[in-house]
Amino acid sequence: MNLGASMAIAEHTVLLIDLDPQANATSSAGLREDRPKFSTYDVLIGGRKMSEAIIKSTVNRFDLVPSDQNLAGAEIELTSLPNRELILKEALADVLGAYEIILLDCPPALGLLTVNALTAAETLLIPVQCEYFAMEGLGRLMATVDLVRQSLNPRLEIEGVVLTMYDGRNNLNRQVADEIRRYLPGKVFQTVIPRNITLAEAPSHGTPVILYDVASTGAQAYLSLTKEVLELSHAEESTR
């Protein structure tokens, strides 16, 4: 959510699709509508067009397809559908030409919702909390990425890893960060998202951190990350 809002501030048209049943991105993005008519559940399971579920955020050029609690049952409902891993990819065809950047916010689980996102995506940006168990999860994610490449999306590339909730005073945080850089050399972004009270406060106010307090350490970190991501994307496009 913070990355998408920062990209929009940089004058890119951005669509964020919330695929997480917890709907944290939806509740913290600063919506102009209290009760969205349709959600990602209606798109994936209910047959609605993606464009029907789009709503505006409080940031210009930054739109959202919201999640809701119904999405929690989508994992079970998707299992009985034909081509179940391709449903999101097919739904995205409705909006591909309307936005420069589409972000797919995945749940913290490697189920069918995440597999749908990996099948539809061109690149994967991986946020990793600087703790031991998050590093274990990174290994499982990379194994899933390999399987998706082999059978569903051979073009999927690793955009990079973002180290989050980092506290440089914590020895374990530093050790985990160093280990991830060794595990994925050249794939870890220079910008590190710190533990920051402003980042924790902004979602409770329903606003991206750059609108809540742009001068804060957290907001500046996301602006720096956005610059890195956009520069990397431009460099990749120029080599294609």
Image (tube, helix red, strand yellow):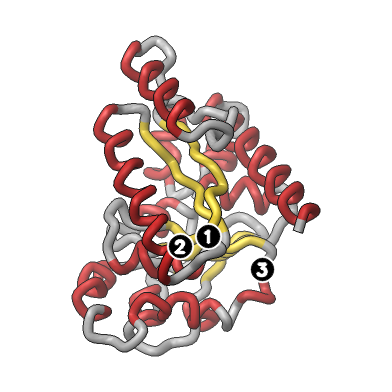
Position of residue 47 relative to residue 1, above or below, is: below
> Marks 3 and 2: in contact by CB < 8 Å?
no
Q: Dot 3, crowdedness within 10 Å: few (<14), some or many (≥20)?
A: some
Q: Nearer the viewer, residue 85 or 130?
A: 85
Q: Nearer the viewer, residue 61 or 212?
A: 61
Give the Cα distance between marks 3 and 1: 20 Å
Q: Hey, what amino acid is under mark 2?
A: Arg
> Marks 1 and 3: in contact by CB < 8 Å?
no
Identify the disc placed on residue 156: 1
- Percent across and percent down for residue 10 are 72, 48
Mark 2 / mark 1, whichever is N-terminal: 2
- Percent across and percent down for residue 49 are 49, 86
Q: Dot 2, crowdedness within 10 Å: few (<14), some or many (≥20)?
A: some
Mark 3 / mark 1, whichever is N-terminal: 3
Could you tell whether 99 is left or right of 154 in the image? right
- Percent across and percent down for residue 164 are 43, 32
Position of residue 41 relative to residue 147, above or below, is: below
Q: Give the structural element (helix, strand or loop) at label 2.
A: helix
Residue underneath mark 3: 99
Count how many numbered circles sit on residues in the image. Answer: 3
Give the Cα distance between marks 2 and 3: 25 Å
Q: Which residue occupies 42% across, 24% down?
A: 177
Number of the front mark, 2 or 3: 2
Q: Hey, what amino acid is under mark 1?
A: Leu
Residue underneath mark 2: 149
Position of residue 124 relative to residue 185, above or below, is: below
For the question of whether residue 37 can be seen, the reply is no
Q: Hey, what amino acid is under mark 3?
A: Tyr
Asked which quadrant contains residue 63, the reply is: bottom right
Number of the front mark, 2 or 1: 2
